[in-house]
Amino acid sequence: MTTPDLEQLKAECVCQKSASAWFCTKADPRWAFSNMAGGMPLFFPMPRAPQNEWCASEQLYQATRYGATIQCLPAANLQAGPCVRNRIRQSKNPRAAKMTQKCAVAAGLVRPDWEHPEQEVRIQTMLWVLELKFYWNPYTFGGTLRETGDLPIVEISTKDAFGGRKAEGDELRGCNVLGKLLMNVRARSATVRRGQFTHPKGWHLP
């Protein structure tokens, strides 16, 4: 399966909030689209089994930033396990998965192709993670996705105009990469539901 055009995904665009399926906070009915939303576990590798469970899409996404042997101890918790990916895997919620590897980010241990302009592993990984999220949660996440019809999907953010868009009145401006990837999964929902993923073997995960 071909990965979407990276330059198109990263291009800035504008749409109207009143004509979009947007989400921003936990109080929004489409919060399921956020990677920080809980209650929608993923399983990788297949099959569905306790040892293959990830508590949320954010957890799996963060784990793909590191090789299996990368080690870094957070100064605030020297008793933690040194393996960054294992710590992320053992996190109990999406926020913990994101916070536990801040030391590794500061130390420059994120894989070098993560934000490479021609590879953009962060984008390709996010698409794959969203496909898994839809596959394993067809009624919660999938139901919310179907309810958007053909409306543009937008994450409204006050800080991130790359993954989402910033609001200026009714105008939403930014790259909205997450929203575009959600629309990509929506357009291919039938094939994704059958387990046809862009990266079936995952991204450097056991």
Image (cartoon, rainbow, N blue to C red):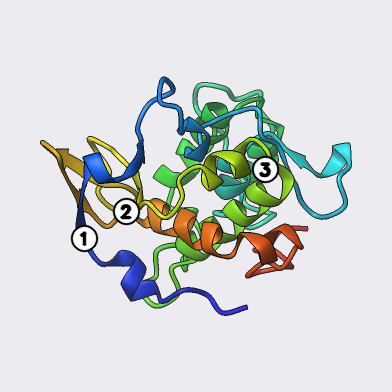
* Percent x, y of residue 7: 32, 74
The numbered dot on residue 159 is: none
Q: Quadrant of the C terminus?
A: bottom right
**Circle 3 — which element?**
loop
Location of the N terminus (image quadrant): bottom right
Cα distance in 3D space between marks 3 and 2: 32 Å
In terms of secondary structure, where does tag 1 sit?
A: strand
Check disc 2 and report the residue beneath it. 176
Spatial separation of the CA atoms under disc 1 and disc 3: 39 Å
The amino acid marked with disc number 1 is Cys
Label number found at residue 13: 1
- Ranked by sequence position, the earlier of labels 1 and 2 is 1
Seen at 27% across and 57% down, the residue is: 175
Task: Count residues near mark 3 (Cα–Cα under 10 Å), then give few for <14, some for 14-19, many for 20+.
Answer: some
Q: Residue at x 34, y 39 (%)?
A: 22
Q: In front: 176, or 64? A: 176
Residue 66 seen in render: no
Residue 29 on image: x %, y %: 45, 27
Q: Is residue 161 left or right of residue 85?
A: left
Q: Earlier in the sequence, mark 3 or mark 2?
A: 3
Q: In the rendered image of this protein, does residue 13 appear above or below residue 154? A: below
Q: Residue at x 27, y 44 (%)?
A: 160
**Which numbered disc covers residue 83?**
3
Q: Is residue 187 above or below residue 158?
A: below
The tally of labels here is 3
Q: Are marks 1 and 2 in contact (CB under 8 Å)?
A: yes
Q: Badge 1 local density, few (<14 within 10 Å), some, or many (20+)? A: few
Regarding residue 141, the answer to whether it shows in the image is yes
Please name the residue shown 53% across and 57% down the image.
186
- In the picture, residue 79 is in which quadrant? top right
Q: What amino acid is labelled 3 in the image?
A: Cys
